[in-house]
Image (cartoon, rainbow, N blue to C red):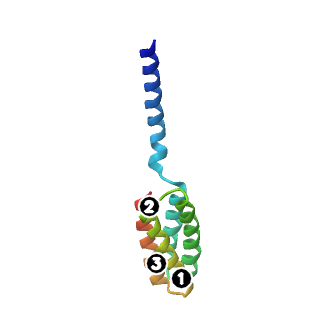
């Protein structure tokens, strides 16, 4: 009887791991949103739209900071710093420099995700 119970518990644990694996692989949803907005910031920056860089980078920063409350990762911290730089330079109308920071943020955030 105990052997059957142990096998049933083991089977249930294996089933849980298999069902939960896709959720773990997807990563934090805030990181995913931060990546999406940081990519948009970089795209618009490449077109010279400094104001759009700021808008998308601010949205990305908001999501990245929410993710920081749930995830401890140095790439996330670097991504946040790069987004802040993108916002600062975009706010000064420096689309090219802001774009470089947005692209760097994407690179770091993808290492978290």
Q: CA distance from mark 2 to mark 1?
A: 23 Å
Point out the residue furthest to the top here: 1
Give the residue number, with chain letter if any, for mark 3. 99
Residue 16, given in percent of the width and then of the height, sits at 48, 33
Q: Nearer the viewer, mark 2 or mark 3?
A: 2
Residue ID at (46%, 11%): 1
Give the residue number, with chain letter if any, for mark 2. 73
Q: Where's the C terminus, which quadrant?
A: bottom left
Residue 104, given in percent of the width and then of the height, sits at 42, 72
Work out whether 47 lies above or below 37: below
Tell me where residue 30 sits by quadrant: bottom right
Q: Nearer the viewer, mark 2 or mark 1?
A: 2
Work out whether 99 lies above or below 67: below
Residue ID at (59%, 69%): 59
**Mark 2 or mark 1, which has the lower sequence index?**
2
Q: CA distance from mark 3 to mark 1?
A: 11 Å
């Amino acid at each position: 009887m105990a052997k059957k119970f142990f096998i049933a518990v083991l089977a249930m644990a294996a089933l849980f791991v298999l069902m939960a694996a896709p959720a773990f692989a997807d990563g934090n949803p805030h990181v995913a949103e931060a990546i999406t907005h940081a990519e948009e910031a970089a795209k618009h920056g490449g077109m010279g739209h400094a104001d759009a860089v700021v808008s998308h980078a601010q949205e990305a920063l908001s999501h990245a900071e929410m993710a920081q409350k749930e995830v401890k990762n140095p790439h996330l911290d670097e991504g946040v710093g790069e987004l802040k730089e993108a916002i600062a330079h975009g706010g000064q109308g420096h689309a090219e420099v802001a774009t470089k920071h947005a692209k760097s943020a994407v690179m770091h955030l993808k290492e978290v995700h």
